Amino acid sequence: MIPLRQNVFRNLTRTNLVKVRASGVLISRFQSSVAGGNSTVAGEKLGKNGAIASETGENALVDSAKQVRNNNTGNRINNSKKIPQRNAKLRDISNQIQDLVKASKSDLTEAVEIMEEGLSYLREIQLSENITDNSIYFRFQPIVTELLFKALEPNSTLGSRSAEDLLDIFSKYGVIHRYHYTVVAVKYFKSGEDKAVIYQNVLQLWLKFLEFDRNNKATGMASVKAGNIEYRPYYLPNLVYFAYGQTCALQGVNFSLEDASKLLNQDLPNVILIRNTLKDLHLFTGYKNEFQEFQKEVNSQNFEAMDPNGHVVYRRIRDASEKKNGNALNSIYSEIQEAASRNKKPINEDTLIRLMDGYFEAGRTDEVFAIFQSLLAHGIEKPSIRAWDVVLRAMGSPSYVNRLSPAQKTKLGTNIEKTVETILSNGTELTAKTLSIVISGFATLDRFDKVDEYLQRFSTEGEGKLPVIAPTKNNILIGLVLNKKITEAETKLKEFVNEKNGYVPSSSVMNTFLGYYAKISNFAAVEGILEFMKKHNIPEEVGTVTSVIDIYFKMHHEKGLAADVDQILQRVSNSKSVPLNDFTYTAIIDGLLKDGNNVAAARSIFDRASKKYATSAHLYSAMLRGELDYGSIEAAEKLFDVYIKKIRNDTRIWNTMINLLLHKREELALQYYENLKNEKLAHPNYFTYYFLFNHFIKRGKKETIQSLIDDLGQRPLRDFGSELPKILNKLAGDYNFSPELSNILAEQKKQN
């Protein structure tokens, strides 16, 4: 092996040589006595655009190393900081290795040997020099990445070593990252070798990665990004999943989703994500046929393995419900219908009720009614009271009632009565909860005559046997306030509170009162409600805070005063019932912007919150939507610019701009679309075109529609979604489609 000191001294200038000798660096031939196998590797942390956060080169170390040990005085490094500390020996050795790697052309033999000897020496002196693992890791990331990319060039030579040997060296001395394994995996896929060999190589590489990952204990950021391969943590397992499936197919072995999950040590990704990975890495064209077979096999096994009434389905429904994601619920419902049909296992009532609940939480009442009809059609002649409860909740929900005309509201009241009679005629007994839901529906409809009638008929306060529980009273109060019967609501509140059963209204009831008083700027009433909540230990919620902030700003505005944002936020913080984090701030901003209620207050809150949570995507997107809906387009554009530069440049935020601008400044929306087409990190997706086509079809702008179709023909999407093909197929007779786009749509039609 070539002595590192000879190479270093050969390249150092006289001035630098004096400095190096003065600091005691590289005076003798390195004789490594410390094994590097136990060294650890800094972990990974994603940056704003999904790539790994970058801290490259000597400048990053210079900026971060505020407290450096002086070799002459013996002062020790202050290790209280998590940032890497600068060390003269680490700096000089790494700089020389970096220069050598940069200068190396096709023959990399010497560069590899010098790097290995330098890393070995640094690990040997690490403890005595107080050099942290992360310091070595950070400093060598750009060096090892450049060396690896050069090593993978067709004409490069590493002597007797291979690219795999390079990975072993990087791993041994703790300077490797998941990205490096991904780069080598991509190289395998592009190698042109027999595909059976390629898949085996990828699987062997994965086993090496798992061994590295198992021993990786340190934390920190990585600084790896080179060539045309972006870093995404899911690329490597996605490639391995595909390679595993193809290996099974080639060997005639049964493809097991359970075994695949064990191999990846994670839940299996959706097969669409595998396709996206192959396309992102420019591999799809060479593996298109294999992917189609892989997709068929995975979908088939998913349906065969899926229990439409199992805990996995229930968890997915719960997750979608919590996120109020109606589209996810649509997908789940479609999948379990397919699984039930294939496996001849009917969907049970409990599953359908969970779906109905999910749709209700997502505000999709029409789907609630449709699934209930499906429940009846599946032979459940006598639905449980749980199912009826969801239907009645949907019928009487304010969001559903508010969109009805007076005549429709009258009909709805009649339908609620008929529903109750149907329940009773089936021999199903009402519960106290059911009664509270029925009362809620009538109260929302402003049918308090029916509220009294049904309480008299079914509750213990009349002729019935059902107790009047707290939710029933809550629903009566909310109904009164929503219908602006505030005097009656206040009287009824006092009546309920003074009853002997110790009724305490819910936070939702109090928020409804607060919201009403805030709208009419009744400042004294707001203070009264807050005192009442304090007296009765009713916890404040985000809705409470939003109403308080709203009224606070309005009160100061009426007096011609500037609101003290810090004071109101301090009050919220002191209450300790609502944690002030970026999610809370986002909810407050959403509430203040609802129907353009208080844009000025929302801006003030955002101004404070964005200083503390400068990279909060939901915080910025909430304010951006508010500005586009009720505020200033110019302000929205500034927020957008910050978002894509400092948070992440993703298609979702572009789509938000385009969709909301279409209804205000059509030409500006089209300009954003044109800009998106030229972006490197974000690209138009099926949502982009869905919004654009929907708008311009309604506007009858045929030239623009044809231009969009031409764009799709020139740059077909990797995923057209479910709705976009329907729109395009309707346009096919009146517009010109490229052969490629026509073929894609025809293929999608076959699959559906």
Image: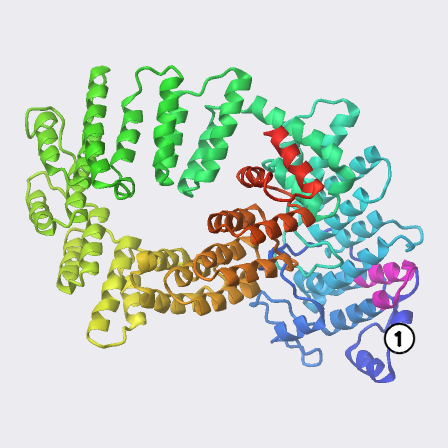
Q: Residue at x 74, y 63 (%)?
A: 142
* Colour scheme employed for the rendering of this structure: rainbow
Image coords of residue 605 (percent x, y): 35, 66
Image coords of residue 468 (percent x, y): 13, 33
As drawn, is 298 to the left or to the right of 312?
Answer: right
**Which quadrant of the structure image shows residue 573?**
bottom left
Q: Nearer the viewer, residue 506 or 596?
A: 596
Residue 112 belongs to magenta span = yes
Secondary structure of residue under mark 1: helix
- Give the main secondary structure, helix, strand or loop, of the magenta stretch: helix
Q: Nearer the viewer, residue 736 or 60?
A: 736
Q: Is residue 205 visible?
A: no
Give, as a single range, the part of the protein colored magenta: 100-119
Q: Residue at x 39, y 23 (%)?
A: 374
Local packing at callout 1 (Cα closer than 10 Å; few below 14, some 14-19, many 20+) is few
Instruction: Name the residue at the front extreme.
Output: 734
Q: Quadrant of the C terminus?
A: top right
Q: Nearer the viewer, residue 421 or 167?
A: 421
As drawn, is 617 to the left or to the right of 546?
Answer: right
**Residue 727 in the image: above or below residue 8:** above
Image coords of residue 27 (percent x, y): 85, 74
Mark 1 belongs to which amino acid?
A: Asn
Q: Which residue is mark 1?
A: 11
